[in-house]
Image (spheres, rainbow, N blue to C red):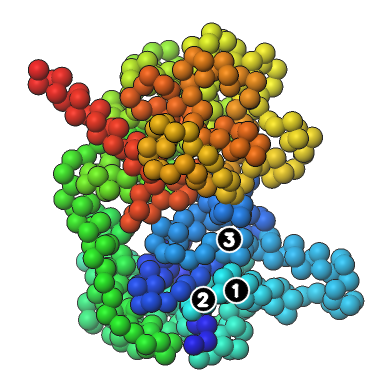
């Protein structure tokens, strides 16, 4: 079977959930026995999202090979088994950078370099590269960032038009659009969808399938209307209604509408009845949990849903694995250093400090770690959250009052967190980063080893600063154990407080490798510790 290509575009408004929709459809095709690969094309000129503000872009997702990518790749990982690498995300910045460098080298032999064909050819090349990430790829999903009508998306759409022309029998377009409900009129409106499709058709792209996102299901009459005015078959109009309980219902809903069956017919793929009982079980737990735990997320961007997207998702996966639900309490770290603030924090069963950069909120996070250590409250520190834990311990247990990270105070006398010596001369922001997957050896009888149930692991990193090995022996002698080590460079990857119910920090980002069907071991252990803490507190109340 030749490789099939599914292009997903968005219309009317942004933030419709193209990534989630693409991942859900890819999951259904995987259940059909197909191997899928996924590519996100982003129209912005940044080379990658690594230096973009989380308020603008959300989290940066990292792949094993060290690519800093769009957060939609997190959806791809959580829903599918698609290979994810540098070939899974491309931006306009990367595309133009590649073409300009070739021009400077003389690769175009003096020709005038233009958007068509040079930029569009490079975009098509990226699609081909994605299809070759590993052998036996059957279907490639290509999601276009932004909204149809955006000026910056035009080169990508033109490239896809050409690609479809060259692979006519093996390519389809799915257009995700918005059907708003006007409460004053009491009606769902299809006109924005019609205009969006007209915009696509004006540049030579005719969608094969239309998926309508909205608050309410579309009636037969409305689907007929969209079919007529957008020139798609009636059976090719689908709706994705806002889900109340969990986004993990989306693939189930699309399967019930036979979207995967229609795609198989369109691409001449043999279809079969698929089994989604694992996903239905997840939805069942979410709707009928046997209990709940509350976790406080302490950070700078907690009010922005996408800034810690994978962390929120991983906590939910872990709760589901225990039959529980998790409630998120968002705590602004820069407010915690105010006098008496730590005593006013919301009462939670545990606290998590996620990754981040910079000084803002640093001292508030230190106060949070101290509170959890002294009150025996479950604590999970990720990346910066682990460094917070180490600095707090050095200050308040070792007695080094000015202990700090050199990221925060370059002149500190006790730099318990610092840059590696070989990084200090690097000026490019990306050049000092430890990015991608690194192996880690776990110490026996540690909480980490108990969670993973293996002695060697591999996890993804995105950080610059490390635990300073000059302080490791003294910290360990005083009860802060380093139970995960990157042995090649003797770098500390996991820290645990010895005489504490559950206080653990990971220098890597475990949230990047959690799935709803397979919760990450550390998140699972953290939620288990919170459940234990909650039960213990309830027993005390009943005495």
Is there any visible trace of residue 174 in the rendered image?
yes
Q: Which residue is mark 1?
A: 132
Of the image marks 3 and 2, the number of the one nearer the N terminus = 3
Mark 2 falls on what kind of element? Answer: loop
User: Splitting the image into 4 quarters, where does residue 219 fall?
Assistant: bottom left
Q: Position of residue 499 (x, y in %)?
A: 38, 19
**Which residue is rendered at x = 20% and y = 23% of the image?**
537
Q: Residue at x 50, y 17 (%)?
A: 393
As measured in the structure, the alpha-carbon distance from the residue carrying label 3 to the one carrying label 1 is: 11 Å
Calculate the distance from the C-alpha at mark 3 to the C-alpha at mark 2. Answer: 14 Å
Q: Return the residue nearer the eye: 141 or 152.
A: 141
Crowd tier of the residue under label 2, counting other residues whose Cα lies within 10 Å: few below 14, some 14–19, many 20 or above? some
- Can residue 232 be seen here? The reply is no
Write down the residue under mark 3.
85
Measuring from the top left, give residue 164's x and y in whole percent.
56, 85
Seen from this angle, which residue lies furthest front? Answer: 444
Dot 3: what SS? loop
Please say if 313 is above or below 150. Answer: above
* Residue drawn 30% across the image and 83% down it: 272
Q: Are marks 2 and 1 in contact (CB under 8 Å)?
A: yes
Q: Is residue 197 left or right of residue 119?
A: left
Which labelled disc corresponds to residue 137?
Answer: 2
Q: Are marks 3 and 2 in contact (CB under 8 Å)?
A: no
């Amino acid at each position: 079977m030749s490789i099939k290509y599914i292009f997903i575009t968005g219309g009317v408004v942004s933030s419709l959930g193209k990534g989630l929709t693409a991942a859900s459809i890819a999951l259904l095709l995987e259940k059909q026995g197909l191997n899928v690969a996924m590519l996100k094309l982003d129209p912005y000129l940044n080379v990658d999202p690594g230096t973009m503000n989380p308020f603008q872009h959300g989290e940066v997702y990292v792949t094993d090979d060290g690519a800093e990518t769009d957060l939609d790749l997190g959806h791809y990982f959580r829903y599918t088994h698609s290979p994810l690498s540098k070939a899974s995300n491309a931006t306009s910045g990367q595309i133009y950078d590649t073409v300009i460098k070739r021009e400077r080298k003389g690769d175009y032999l003096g020709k005038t370099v233009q958007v068509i064909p040079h930029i569009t050819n490079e975009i098509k090349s990226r699609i081909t590269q994605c299809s070759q990430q590993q052998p036996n790829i059957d279907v490639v999903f290509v999601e276009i960032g932004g909204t149809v009508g955006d000026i910056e998306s035009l080169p990508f759409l033109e490239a896809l038009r050409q690609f479809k022309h060259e692979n006519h029998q093996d390519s389809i377009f799915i257009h995700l659009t918005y059907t708003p409900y006007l409460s004053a009129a009491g009606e769902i409106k299809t006109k924005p969808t019609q205009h969006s499709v007209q915009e696509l058709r004006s540049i030579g792209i005719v969608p094969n399938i239309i998926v309508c996102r909205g608050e309410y299901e579309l009636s037969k009459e409305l689907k007929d209307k969209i079919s007529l005015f957008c020139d798609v078959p009636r059976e090719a109009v689908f709706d994705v209604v806002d889900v109340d309980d969990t986004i993990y219902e989306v693939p189930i809903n699309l399967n019930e509408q036979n979207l995967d069956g229609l795609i198989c017919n369109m691409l001449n793929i043999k279809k079969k009845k698929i089994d989604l009982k694992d996903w239905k079980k997840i939805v069942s737990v979410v709707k009928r949990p046997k209990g709940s735990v509350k976790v406080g997320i302490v950070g700078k961007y907690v009010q922005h849903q996408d800034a810690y997207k994978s962390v929120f998702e991983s906590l939910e996966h872990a709760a589901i694995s225990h039959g529980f639900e998790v409630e998120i309490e968002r705590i602004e770290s820069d407010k915690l250093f105010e006098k008496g603030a730590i005593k006013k924090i919301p009462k939670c069963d545990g606290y998590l400090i996620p990754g981040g950069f910079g000084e803002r909120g640093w001292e508030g996070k230190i106060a949070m770690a101290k509170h959890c250590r002294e009150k025996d409250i479950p604590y999970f520190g990720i990346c910066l959250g682990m460094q917070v834990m180490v600095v707090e311990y050095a200050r308040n247990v070792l007695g080094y009052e000015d202990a700090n990270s050199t990221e925060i105070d370059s002149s500190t006398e006790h730099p318990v967190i610092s840059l590696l010596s070989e990084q200090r001369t690097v000026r490019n922001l990306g050049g000092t980063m430890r990015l991608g997957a690194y192996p880690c050896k776990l110490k026996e009888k540690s909480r980490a080893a108990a969670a993973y149930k293996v002695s060697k692991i591999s996890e993804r990193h995105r950080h610059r600063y490390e635990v300073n090995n000059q302080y490791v022996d003294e910290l360990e002698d005083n009860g802060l154990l380093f139970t995960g080590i990157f042995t090649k460079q003797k770098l500390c990857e996991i820290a645990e407080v010895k005489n504490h119910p559950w206080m653990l920090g990971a220098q890597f980002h475990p949230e990047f490798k959690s799935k709803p069907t397979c919760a990450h071991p550390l998140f699972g252990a953290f939620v288990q510790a919170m459940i234990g803490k909650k039960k213990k507190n309830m027993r005390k109340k009943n005495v």
